[in-house]
Image (spheres, rainbow, N blue to C red):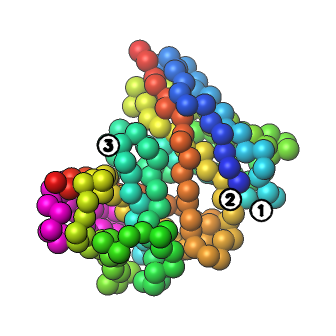
Amino acid sequence: DTEVTQTPKHLVMGMTNKKSLKCEQHMGHRAMYWYKQKAKKPPELMFVYSYEKLSINESVPSRFSPECPNSSLLNLHLHALQPEDSALYLCASSRGSSGANVLTFGAGSRLTVL
Amino acid sequence: DAKTTQPPSMDCAEGRAANLPCNHSTISGNEYVYWYRQIHSQGPQYIIHGLKNNETNEMASLIITEDRKSSTLILPHATLRDTAVYYCIVRVAAQASGNKLVFGAGTILRVKS
């Protein structure tokens, strides 16, 4: 298995809803990432988990809450989002956490906040 | 990590080689050059990376100048499926603080029949 699987592919939520994005990989990778991508812009790093511990938080608002229950799973919990949070959310994984590692990306979850 | 400069867009005829330039004039000796691409509505895909020497794999070739201040990604026989945004990224290989892969604006490559 050489894939990163993200669910759901599409999500529409209201500003008062609580929802979660899920990411899964079975490549034995020990680092996992969340990126946010707005239309016609490059992906922006949000969080990095290394060996199930949060190692990088790029000053992301607390309405986004990451969770790494085990080395294969990465969740992004969403609460009280704003319409400007509508974007493509990309998950990625890599074998290790050093800069020499190549990232494998999922296809993304497209979020619309009404 | 060193900053990169890429042209905003390029066109290429189908079947011809696509040569995508990247300038990284402030690159340090311990920084690698990575290339990823993103086809519309998909996640980014790793293509190739290198330090000093030219590299080739099944997807592309990477030519790095001797002074390492610039590089060129070569897709030898571009197809319509190679239409994508191509990102050149420079980063330190042994980065203890985590794998902070930062994307720039990239180059939109349009392959035309």
Q: Which residue is mark 1?
A: B30
Residue A6's place in the image compared with B86, above or below, is: below
Q: Nearer the viewer, mark 2 or mark 3?
A: 2
Q: Which subunit holds the residue at mark 3?
A: B
Q: Are marks 2 and 3 on the same chain?
A: yes
Q: Which subunit holds the residue at mark 2?
A: B
Q: Residues within 10 Å of mark 1 (few under 14, many from 20)?
A: few
Q: Residues within 10 Å of mark 2 (few under 14, many from 20)?
A: some
Tell me the distance, in whole angstroms, between the alpha carbons under discs 3 and 1: 33 Å
Residue B44's place in the image compared with B95, above or below, is: above
**Could you say which disc has been placed on residue B104 in the image?**
none
Of the residues shown, which amino acid type is indicated by label 1? Asn
Of the residues shown, which amino acid type is indicated by label 3? Ser
Q: Nearer the viewer, mark 1 or mark 2?
A: 2
Q: Earlier in the sequence, mark 1 or mark 2?
A: 2
Q: Earlier in the sequence, mark 3 or mark 1?
A: 1
Tell me the distance, in whole angstroms, between the alpha carbons under discs 2 and 3: 27 Å
Residue stretch rendered in magenta on the structure: A1-25
SS for tag 3? loop
Image quadrant assignment for residue A25: bottom left
Residue at the spot 49% in from the left edge and 29% down from the top edge: B109
Q: Which residue is mark 2?
A: B1
Measuring from the top left, give residue B6's x and y in whole percent.
62, 36
SS for tag 2? loop
Image quadrant assignment for residue A75: bottom left
Contact (Cβ within 8 Å) of mark 2 with mark 3? no
